[in-house]
Image (cartoon, rainbow, N blue to C red):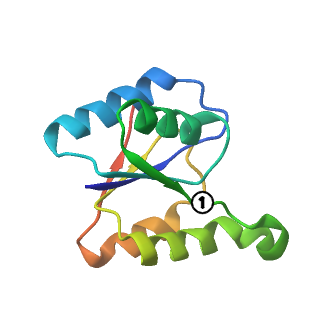
Amino acid sequence: MKVYVVGFYKNEDRESVFRQLSDWHRREIITDVITGGEETGTDLHAMQWADENEIEYRTYKPDWKADGGSAAIKRNFVLYGQEKPDLILLFENARGVDNLTKLARDGKTQIVQVEE
């Protein structure tokens, strides 16, 4: 299962990210973790979890310089088109995710808002 992890770059709750990914991994084997590539917060915790569990991860960083304020939205379209994640985990304070819910209307991607 491919999981796209979305959250806030200031998220310090590593345990929550690890717990959620571990719980989903027990339900269905996670084969790939996808993040926005931030070096802090939710993205960092997800990459660390993947490393510790020997699971491949990929990052899709928004190009703020080229795309300005729409960089995250453009990144999500590219990511979704290339990766077709099975699950999107939205952690607290995830921003710019409205387009993800529209993309996931294909019925093949489950979106879960993490409330912890």
Residue 91 point in image, percent of width and height: 47, 41
Q: Nearer the viewer, residue 85 or 72?
A: 85
70 relative to 10, above or below: below
Residue 1 point in image, percent of width and height: 25, 55
Residue 116 visible (yes or no) = no
Residue shown at 17%/35% (left/top)?
26
Numbered disc total = 1
Residue 11 point in image, percent of width and height: 60, 31
Residue 25 point in image, percent of width and height: 23, 39
Residue 10 visible (yes or no) = yes
On the picture, is 30 further left or further right than 90? left
Which residue is identified by label 1? 96
Residue lying farthest to the left in this orientation: 27
Residue shown at 71%/72% (left/top)?
70
Residue shown at 41%/74% (left/top)?
103
Asked where in the image residue 74 lies, by quadrant, the reply is bottom right
Residue lying farthest to the front in this orientation: 54
The amino acid at mark 1 is Gly
